[in-house]
Amino acid sequence: MTEVTNPPGTTASNGSAGPILEVNDLRMHFPVTTGVVFRKTVGTVKAVDGVTFSIQPGETLGLVGESGCGKTTLGRCVLRFYNPTSGQMHFRGESLTDIRGGRMRELRKQMQMVFQDPYSSLNPRMTAGQIIGEPLKIHRLASDPKQSRERVAEILSLVGLDPSMASRYPHEFSGGQRQRIGIGRALAVDPALIVCDEAVSALDVSIQAQIINLLKDLQDRLGLTYLFIAHDLAVVRHVADRIAVMYLGKIVEIAPRDDIYANPLHPYTQALLSAVPVPDPVVEAARPRQIIIGEVPSPLNPPSGCVFHPRCPIAQEDCSVDVPELRELRPGHWVACPKV
Amino acid sequence: MSVVLEIEDLRTYFDTEGGLVKAVDGVSYTVEEGETLGLVGESGGGKSVTALSGIRLIPTPPGRIVSGRVLYKGQDLLELSLDGMRHIRGRAIGMIFQEPMTSLNPVLSIGRQLTEPLITELGLSKYDANARAHELLASVEISDPERRLAQFPHHFSGGMRQRVMIAMALSCNPAVLIADEPTTALDVTVQAQILELMQRLTEERGGALVIITHNLGVVARYADRVNVMYAGKIVERSSATAVYGDPRHPYTLGLMSSVPRLDLPVTERLVQVDGQPPNLVDLPPGCAFQPRCPYAQEQCLEAVPELMQTVDNHYAACFIADQLGAGAKAGQA
Ligand SMILES: Nc1ncnc2c1ncn2[C@@H]1O[C@H](COP(=O)(O)OP(=O)(O)OP(=O)(O)O)[C@@H](O)[C@H]1O
Ligand SMILES: Nc1ncnc2c1ncn2[C@@H]1O[C@H](COP(=O)(O)OP(=O)(O)OP(=O)(O)O)[C@@H](O)[C@H]1O
Ligand SMILES: [Mg+2]
Ligand SMILES: [Mg+2]
């Protein structure tokens, strides 16, 4: 790697407190094995391959990209569900890669995750109250059952559910209500950073808006920081302050929200934005359609050079050779393409 | 324009543990030659069951088609014997299913799966069926058909699999192609490729295309007319421009204003439809949307509004549809 002196994101607000999360040249490679008895490694999936970014306190960083590009893996590395292959991560200046044990548990408490699937991410045999109360127990945040019950009731109303619903089981709730329980579980330990992994993707449009509004309200009230992972670019635009676009394990563009939507620079970002249909037939009829060819290649066998070059409309010969670095083309606007 | 498929007062119910689910409850619509028809609505609203009823693929029990007619060339598909149905099904309606894994058999080669209906339903010889399978793969832009026909579904990427399913649905040259969430599992860039392909094929073949989806952008881009479903009923129907530009049912209105849009400035909060989706075994009295409706009045609890014309060819099932003109949308936002 060349100089990573100024990771994308830190330049925008080189202010007082510094970033809440800093990720530097992070890699997560999974071995691919065959055989049942004698396992043989036949290759590596470079799910996350040299990712650098940071998030400021109270900020929402949106992470977009197509299926399999490594969004979930990145989120899971940040929360240390995975042990990254290489790279550094710092939470409020403290290294996440070096610490263990009690301190790790303490930091984990400050970082929580909300999952995509409101159906499978909740234990069907626990009541809503038990689900939200469990992290309180694990982290010993309630001194007695009464205090725990009060806190659960408080959280239920915080996420827009009636405290009397504490005794109900997940199957007695609708999808949107289950997602509220999932958010409540994450909030129970009073976290600073929440990774939302496709938290609204499975919901109906009419319910999606409720949950997005709830996440924004909670951010305002509790000063939360979000890493907001989603594949719906319109949803991400609505919630994020800055947006990172991933393709095959790499960030190809990262910029403030309005900048990236008004002025996408990377050919992949441009293709992605043009592929999203606008829910308005009049607007659609007048819109040019720029359809890019091909599909996302397998991360087992990624293209050489720039991983996007086989699908890129402006690729030139050297694109299959040189791996592009992120360059800051405008304040806070970083692009990994030498041709723009 | 001539009508190629006509669905009349279709009712499909399911007996479930919780009670009777009226998944489709009095749905009527037509599909016209050459058009792309969009079917949108809340999850569980009955979109898939509407389509599956038409080709008689409702699991019985628990499901049963209680009433209705599905008219193709003057013939009621619901009255045909199973044998007659098998003969006509592929020519009347080609279907791309919502669950991709249920429609491709993992242990049969793509060639086998493509040629079989051609042989059994159209009576082609093995040789002709094979030639037609080549043609079909080429038409969905899959190169090297010879090699591809010998392969199995797991050799194909998600987008390629969807292309194969389109080829299969088109194999008997159906009058109507129904695509149930054809791109939900696909990446945005591949989704655009597949939709363009389906639209091009529909134009070339002169058939009609029905797209079932909850993606309002997809319908806006491709559909000529739109049906909006809620709790087993069609609550609004008109041209795409009218349904999007001048929605007359409060559910459609809420749907249109709650979806974040890339082409408009970001607002602080999204307009949201309050409340929860309906529980089909325990529907509220009167209009099913009434508990969530900001305009609900007393009469909405007392009677179920019929789908009626408000302005030219614009239908809505709401007592105050006439007052919900373009002005109301601005007022609500
Ligand atoms: N535990 C694992 N072992 C091996 N490979 C993995 C593992 N987790 C993820 N991968 C692979 O890493 C790549 C990135 O996966 P990841 O789930 O992070 O993608 P994603 O961007 O979240 O996709 P989606 O939008 O579909 O959720 C994929 O090719 C995936 O198959
Ligand atoms: N086999 C079945 N047994 C019992 N109920 C069923 C069955 N199939 C469908 N239903 C019910 O019928 C209703 C309509 O389902 P349908 O699949 O048509 O909804 P949909 O509009 O296609 O929703 P989605 O957008 O989620 O695909 C649902 O409430 C569903 O639970
Ligand atoms: Mg993921
Ligand atoms: Mg469906």
Image (spheres, coloured by chain):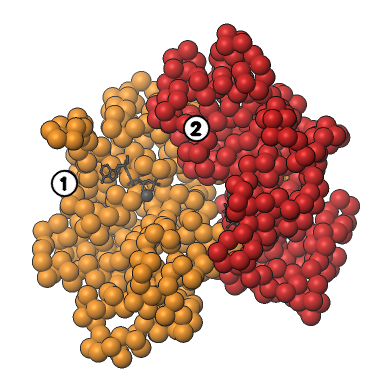
Image disc number at residue B104: 2
The answer to which quarter of the image holds residue B267 is bottom right
Query: Which chain wears orange?
Result: A
Circle count: 2
Question: Looking at numbered disc 2 in the image, what kind of residue is underneath it?
Answer: Leu
- Secondary structure under tag 2 reads loop
Q: Hue of chain B? A: red
Residue A178 percent across, percent down from the top left: 45, 68
Q: Mark 1 = which residue?
A: A86
Residue A296 percent across, percent down from the top left: 40, 34
As displayed, is residue B180 above or below residue A258? above
- Secondary structure under tag 1 reads strand
Within-10-Å neighbours for mark 1: few <14, some 14–19, many 20+: some
Residue that sits furthest to the top in the current view: B127
**Quadrant showing the C terminus of chain B:** bottom right
The residue lying at 44 percent from left, 76 percent from top is A168
Left or right: residue B99 compared with residue A47:
right
Within-10-Å neighbours for mark 2: few <14, some 14–19, many 20+: many
| Chain under disc 2 | B
Comparing A170 with A198, the one in front is A170
| Chain under disc 1 | A
Left or right: residue A27 compared with residue A338:
left
Question: Looking at numbered disc 1 in the image, what kind of residue is underneath it?
Answer: Ser
Question: Ligand 2 is located in which of the four quadrants?
Answer: bottom right
The residue lying at 35 percent from left, 66 percent from top is A123
Question: Which callout, 1 or 2, points to the residue nearer the camera?
Answer: 2
Residue B314 percent across, percent down from the top left: 83, 54
